[in-house]
Amino acid sequence: MTRPRTLARAVATSLMFALPVGTALAKDTGYIFVSSENDNAVTVLDGKRHQVLKTIPTGERPRDMKRSADRSQILVIASNSERVDVIDIARLEVVRSIDVGEDPEMFDFSKDGSRIYVSNEEDAEVSVIDVAANKVLAKIEVGEEPEGMLVSKDGSRLYVTSEVANMVHVIDTASNAILANVVVGNRPRRFADTPDGGEVWVTNELGASVTVLDAKANAVKETVTFAPKGFRSDDVTPVGITMTRDGKTAYVTLGRANHVAVVDVATRKVRDYVLVGNRAWGATLNRDESMLVVVNGLSDDISLVDTKTNKVLRSVAVGRVPHTAVIDD
């Protein structure tokens, strides 16, 4: 999901202050960063030849990653180390860490970039972290096993999935109060939202579906179900989701079904199923949206998909049990 570039100054101030004087900035390198849970590392691939440039050691069990708004750093959750590691793209190394509480899994930035919201799975909480001060500002109680995190386009709301409660919590970011608890499908995982912020899509891992929420009403609008040929419903386990900037197409990874669903957002129809690697997990688009990078957690690789043809261009080996990919372009 693309964040507004107005975040740049705030995140640059809050994150860059800790770096040594003279640290170079690197932007639009084309590098593909892939976190690998069992290697305690992030693999960096060249964006053209897709060869491994470097393996960056991190804390234990790196998972969710996002790029800072000034595009100079990659933040990665190290779940078993209870921290977020900050990777400098120019140096390709961890330059600082942020304490984020027990068993963190996913996170998102506040609109001004000064805070991150982190799901703490074992504690059934969301931690609100002051990035510059490396300080927990608040803890918000939510349902069991929170995972997916999404800050709304205007920054006023935080959406959190609770895997056990089959629920999406809608939180007021000004007061940290829960505004609504919306029952969705079985084991909700991750989010995408439309460009106008009017709809929030959430994947249901054990429901073979995506729930479409009306963001204004905090209510379920529709459900999109998936049935790739040759797979039982129990094997269709949607987790990752990303949407094009124009809001016309959503890509949903189908987990054990080893496919990505290409969905027409307006009609809610599945246009295509793309065969990728084993346990298709995360997905992200490059800047011009010509290529979809799919992270395959059980084949230890990524699939590079041509979005014009919906064909896999190639598969590239990465670390063991890859979780998330971020493209620096």
Image (cartoon, helix red, strand yellow):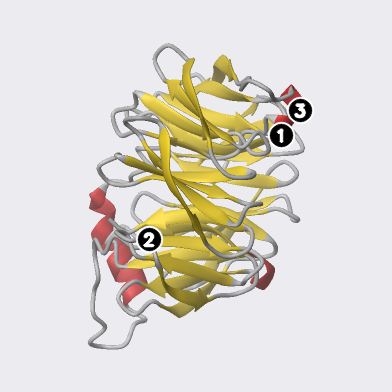
Amino acid type of disc 3? Asp
The x and y percentages for residue 168 are 62, 33
The reply to whether residue 215 is in sight is no
Asked which quadrant contains residue 311, the reply is top left
Amino acid type of disc 2? His
The x and y percentages for residue 92 are 38, 76
Q: Nearer the viewer, mark 1 or mark 3?
A: 3
Quarter of the rendering occupied by the N terminus: top left
Label whose residue precedes the other's in the sequence (1 or 3): 1
Q: Who is closer to the viewer here, 229 or 114?
A: 229
Asked which quadrant contains residue 15, the reply is bottom left
Which residue occupies 60% across, 38% down? 239
Q: Which residue is mark 2?
A: 50
Q: Who is closer to the viewer here, 87 or 113?
A: 87
Quarter of the rendering occupied by the C terminus: bottom left
Give the vertical position of 194 relative to 7 (above or below).
Answer: above
Q: CA distance from mark 2 to mark 1?
A: 34 Å
The x and y percentages for residue 322 are 58, 58
Are circles 2 and 1 on residues that touch, CB within 8 Å? no
Amino acid type of disc 1? Arg
- Crowding at dot 2, Cα within 10 Å, few <14 / some 14-19 / many 20+, comes out as some
Q: Which residue is mark 1?
A: 187
In what element is the residue under mark 2?
Answer: loop
| Residue found farthest to the bottom | 21
